[in-house]
Amino acid sequence: MHWHTRKVLSWRAPNTMDSDFCVEALEEALRGYGTPEIFNTDQGTQFTADAFTRVLKEHEVTISMDGKARWIDNVFVERLWRSVKYEDVYLRAYETLAALRAGLDKYFRFYNTRRRHTGLDRRTPDAVYFEQTALKSAA
């Protein structure tokens, strides 16, 4: 997630707790949106794994990890998953992993392109992200 704009850059819905799915999502985001200065995450084993941190180090990204049990440090991601659960997953009660993935793909497209956010002056994540990108390009 791009913190300033709340845009979901990449996601995965794994059925394991290894780091492979996190590395895949990270690499996809880096390919699609470029290299950030700082990458913030919690201290979950997927994010502290050598495979994950190696990708960030190779791209010279500063790694910022939240303090233990500090959900507030990662509040935007926590809020995102709360929205995902209450606005989609709990309502649809997906019966298979394939159905969940298809539903989440649809939800995240909605979230980025049509879901307006109070914290973004009632704009969508895409609108704010692409406006910011255009301003950086113009400068």
Image: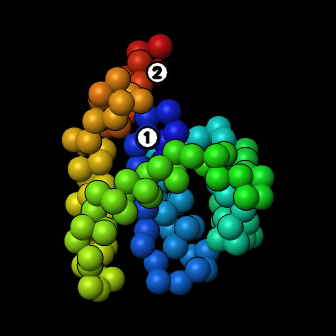
Looking at the image, which residue is at 42% across and 73% down? 13
Q: In this view, does 52 lie to the left or right of 67?
A: left
- The residue under label 2 is which amino acid type? Lys
Looking at the image, which residue is at 52% across and 60% down? 27
The one of 95 and 4 positioned closer to us in this rendering: 95
Give residue 6's mark: 1
- The residue under label 1 is which amino acid type? Arg
Q: How is the image coloured?
A: rainbow
Looking at the image, which residue is at 50% across and 68% down? 24
Q: Which of marks 1 and 2 is in front?
A: 1
Element under label 1?
A: loop
Q: Position of residue 3 (x, y in %)?
A: 52, 39
The one of 105 and 34 positioned closer to us in this rendering: 105
**Relative vertical location of residue 68 with respect to residue 130 in this rendering, above or below:** below
Give the image quarter of residue 57: bottom right
Residue that extends furthest to the right in the rendered view of this protein: 67
Q: Name the residue under label 2.
A: 136
